Amino acid sequence: MGFSLLCGPLMGSGSRSHTFGFHSELIEGGKVVPLGINVSRRPGSSVLGYTVGQLFGEQNEAGLVWNDPERRDGDIIWLKEPSSWLQIYFNDGWRAVGAGRQDYSRHVIQPNGGVFFQSSRENDYLLAFGGYLLTGPMVKTVEPGFNLVSRGFPVEMTLEETHLHDSPGLGPRDVVWIWSDSQYLRVRYNGKKWTDLTGRGDYGWIPVPSMLVIQVLGKGGTITMHPPRYLLGKKTVDSRALPRPPRMYLSFGTSDQGNPTFVAQWRALSPKVGYTTEVWSRDGWFTISNRRGQAGEVLSDLALLHRLRNGVARVRADFAGPEFVGRVD
């Protein structure tokens, strides 16, 4: 998240909220780019699932350029269907090329998949998504042909870190297409390492974009994308000795300086309960703030999106003893 790390690695216990986060993806002007959404709308979910309206807003809150179906002068979202592609655009509602004024706002995007975003703008820009993390590794079934597969988590990972190569559904001839530096890199796993299609190089270090394309040349099956180390912590066991975990309310906003923000809010249970915001880094979880509030008071933390491309956090609740350093707002 967009916070400075205020203290060392986390050692405390307590009841924790569902883990949440955000990621911002580069939409390149005048190009068709892969786009995966790696947060869930609902806490505690094991699947990344959206409709068109849920993902981009019922009234196009994401700000896609309106498209005239005859002139084709706006943005297009390409959705892979079992035997075809849908070209979705916004024009006083979500429409599909060739389907007239039919409403596609409730059309379901393939779970744990993604889309191709065809931008009509001249300039590049960032599109941000916020929500909750999956409760475990992301699992998807791939079939012969091309498959769109989300990365699964809203943080940067290398191809090696995902452990995709351990998936039973990934065959030795299958090709993974990775969008990198405005072009596709094609790699496959030879049983020991990721190489290019000639068997040269070692590409396990390459960053995984928000969505991969897996070209299955064998029979397919189940593939799994694992999260980085420490990202999915242990769940807190329910206990009468612990306060109720905070229920999070997530949104995007604007700071007093006019910068875009990702905001996490929750209601204080009592002045006797202290709340600690924790953020994830590759070294583990770190504390960034402690606070208390009157019963029912709204507490919050935020991330500045012009500084960070992604972030993951959670809020821990403890009964605040005299050693708890936090303010009562």
Image: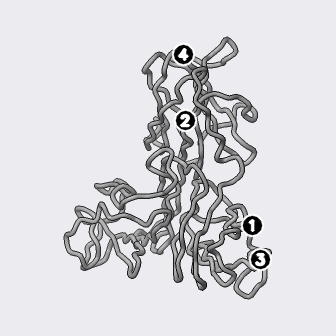
| Upstream in sequence: badge 2 or badge 1 | 2
Look at mark 3 in the image and give the residue it sits on: 191
| Upstream in sequence: badge 4 or badge 2 | 2
Look at mark 4 in the image and give the residue it sits on: 328
| Upstream in sequence: badge 3 or badge 4 | 3
Dot 1 alpha-carbon crowd within 10 angstroms: few under 14, some 14 to 19, many 20 or more? few
**Cα–Cα gap, marks 2 and 1:** 32 Å
Give the amino acid at mark 1: Trp
Viewer-side label of 3, 1: 3
**Cα–Cα gap, marks 4 and 1:** 46 Å
Viewer-side label of 4, 2: 2
Residue 258 x/y as whole percent: 45, 41
Circle 2/circle 1 CB separation < 8 Å: no
Circle 3/circle 2 CB separation < 8 Å: no
Residue 153 x/y as whole percent: 58, 55
Q: Is residue 79 above or below residue 263?
A: below
Look at mark 2 in the image and give the residue it sits on: 17
Give the amino acid at mark 4: Val
Look at mark 1 in the image and give the residue it sits on: 205
| Upstream in sequence: badge 3 or badge 2 | 2
Q: Nearer the viewer, residue 199 or 5?
A: 199
